[in-house]
Amino acid sequence: MELQARIAQIKGNGQIAPPHTWISSYNVNKNGKKYTYYRLMKADPTRSSHSKVRGKMVKYLGSADSKEYKKMKEAIARRNQLQDLLRQLQTLEKEVSGGQTKKKHKQPPLTTLVVELMTLVQELQAEIQSLKEQLKDRNRTPKELVPT
């Protein structure tokens, strides 16, 4: 199915932003100049009120030129594309099944499960990368420092 291929392609293109996150900007004045910086925010239900969702800072992203900002902007775009495709796929599945839905037990939405799974996979990939780097560092140790 074309939608599933596009979903797989988006997942393979890089990091997917966690759900309920967004990029927030703030300005700083230094020596008469105005600088804009960015940070990743996550919805914090404990701080939210009825009319406004408040966020908690997850990560500092730096300026618009920073690698972290650009990477997170792309990750959020991928997440939004993925959510849209998953909604389309869900709609098609309902149409194919004749609109009948089986109500066995309540499960979280498929999008939430997929995003949680992708987050876990990304964490594991980062851990594997870290272990690879540690192994490379050990292999670079000068031979005269290694006891024989």
Image (tube, rainbow, N blue to C red):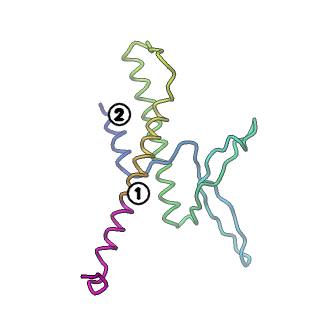
Magenta residue check for 142: yes
Q: Residue furthest front?
A: 148
Q: Residues within 10 Å of mark 2 (few under 14, many from 20)?
A: some
Image coordinates for residue 148, horizontal then vertical, percent: 24, 82
Q: Amino acid at mark 2?
A: Leu
Q: Is residue 45 above or below residue 58?
A: above
Image coordinates for residue 115, horizontal then vertical, percent: 46, 40
In this view, the residue in front, 6 or 142, is: 142
Image coordinates for residue 59, horizontal then vertical, percent: 58, 58
Residue that badge 1 annotates: 126
Q: Residue at x 51, y 54 (%)?
A: 73
Where disc 1 sits, the SS reads helix
Q: Amino acid at mark 1?
A: Ala
Looking at the image, tell me whether mark 1 or mark 2 is earlier in sequence order. 2
Answer with the quarter of the image where residue 99 lies: top left
Residue 147, numbered label: none
Mark 1–mark 2 Cα distance, whole angstroms, equals 28 Å
- Read off the magenta span: 129-148
Image coordinates for residue 52, horizontal then vertical, percent: 73, 41
Q: Is residue 102 above or below residue 139?
A: above
Q: Is residue 65 left or right of residue 129?
A: right
Nearer the observer: mark 1 or 2; the answer is 1
Answer with the quarter of the image where residue 129 lies: bottom left
Contact? badges 1 and 2 (CB < 8 Å): no
Q: Main secondary structure of the magenta part?
A: helix
Q: How many callouts does the rendering have?
A: 2
Residue that badge 2 annotates: 3
